[in-house]
Structures are given as structure tokens and as C-alpha cells.
Amino acid sequence: MKENPFPYSHWTKFLGLLIMAAGVFSFFQQHHKKGVFDLNELAIGFSWGLVFVFFSKEKTDDEMIQGLKFKALARAIIVAFFITHLYNYLFLNWHFDRGHDTILSISAYQFMALTLILATGSFYYLKHQLTLNEEQ
Amino acid sequence: MRNLIKVERARSNMTQAELAEKVKVARQTIIAIEGGKFVPSTVLAFKIAKVLNCTMDLLFELEDKDWE
């Protein structure tokens, strides 16, 4: 019997959703208190929440589901890295001076959140595509 | 890879849900395999053949594009 590579039980998806909701709540609370939109606050909630949503077992977890998750994650990492690099270049390092400046980047939480949003969306899209027009 | 799972399943008077339950996969997986969108592992293919009471070479057949 093959070991399932996804460590969390199915119910942790709900825990992930709760963490994401807490992240959104905290984001708006910070805005209310300090008057700033702190995207890191939101990204922390989303990245932790999506770790539990994406890396938990599905209701029926089989080899196709695991293959689709791997495919979705592989695609998401490439796309998220490309978007991150483009954003860093265009918005954070446009006037970068190699002699004086240090390279700026979005936070690890924001990169992780972006990657997992893309991976989760891509997984459900691929799953839907595979069974499209084939339902009984 | 071409397969005759749909035909053999109909012959066995079994629904996709029943077959999925017997081989312990999601019904979507059976739908994808029957539609030729997903090629199962050897273990799963053997399980399907056993449940449908037929041999692997009857159930699965290589196509020319599989050699490319």
C-alpha cells in the first residue's frame, strides 16, 4: 500500500478556512486601528490557511488526485515565481542602482500565499476539466 | 491508451460509483479513466480488471501515439 504524501486529515481544510478568515479579520482590524492596508497581515493568514487547505487529504484521495495536486503545485510555483520577479522588477527595483541599492522583494508570506492560491485554483480547475462532459 | 472499461462495466451491470467504491478511488477517477484522460497505475489497472472479471490485455490496449 502506497503512503499518502499529504500529511493532514480532510477536516484540516476547515481549520485552514478559519485561519484565512482570521487573516482577513486581522487585515481589516489593522486598517481600522492604524489606517493602513498591511498586505503582509493578509498574506500570513492566507499562506497558513492554504497550507492546511492544499496539503490536506481529499474526501477520496487516490492516485489521480495526488497527480493533479502535484501538477497544480508545479505549475503554480513557476507562475508565482514569474509574477514575483516581474512585480519586484517593475514596482520595487525599477530604478535599481547596482552600486548602491539592495534588491527589494515581496515577503515570503506573500509569495507563499500567491503560490498556494494559484495551486489550489489550478487543482480544482484541472479536476473539473478531467470530469467535464463525462458525468453519468 | 485505449480501454474498454465502459463496455466491460456495462456488461457487469455496474455503475461508475460502484466500480469506484470497489477499487477504492473517487468516481471522478473512473470517469477520467473511461474518458481516456487519465492512465491508471498498474496496481489500479489490475484491480479494475479483477473487479470486472477480465484480463488486463482485454481491458487496455496501446495506441500508436503511445509509442511516440
Image (cartoon, coloured by chain):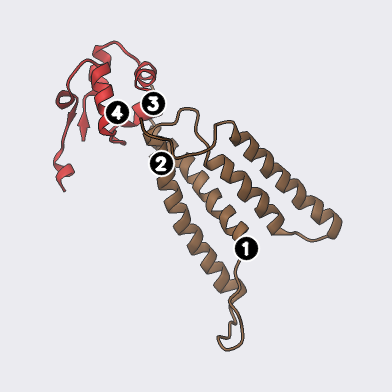
Residue B52: numbered disc: none
- State which chain disc 3 sits on: B
Residue B44: numbered disc: 4
Q: Are marks 2 and 4 on the same chain?
A: no
Residue A68: numbered disc: 2
Discs 4, 3 touching: Cβ within 8 Å: yes
Residue lying at the far bottom in this picture: please name it.
Answer: A99
Up/down of A49 relative to A128, above or below? below
Tint of chain A? brown
Residue B25: numbered disc: 3
- State which chain disc 2 sits on: A
In x, y percent, where is residue A99? 57, 89
Residue lying at the far top in this picture: please name it.
Answer: B13
Chain letter, colour red? B
* Helix, strand or loop at mark 1: loop
User: Could you give the CA–CA distance between mark 2 and mark 1, rounded to whole angstroms?
Assistant: 28 Å
- According to the picture, the residue beneath numbered tag 1 turns out to be A107
User: Could you give the CA–CA distance between mark 1 and mark 3, rounded to whole angstroms?
Assistant: 39 Å
Between marks 2 and 1 in the image, the one whose residue lies nearer the viewer = 1
**Residue for point 35% across, 15% down:** B15
Residue type at mark 4? Leu
User: Could you give the CA–CA distance between mark 1 and mark 4, rounded to whole angstroms?
Assistant: 42 Å
Residue lying at the far right in this picture: please name it.
Answer: A33
Which of the marked residues, 4 or 3, is nearer the chain's N terminus? 3
Q: Residues within 10 Å of mark 3 (few under 14, many from 20)?
A: some
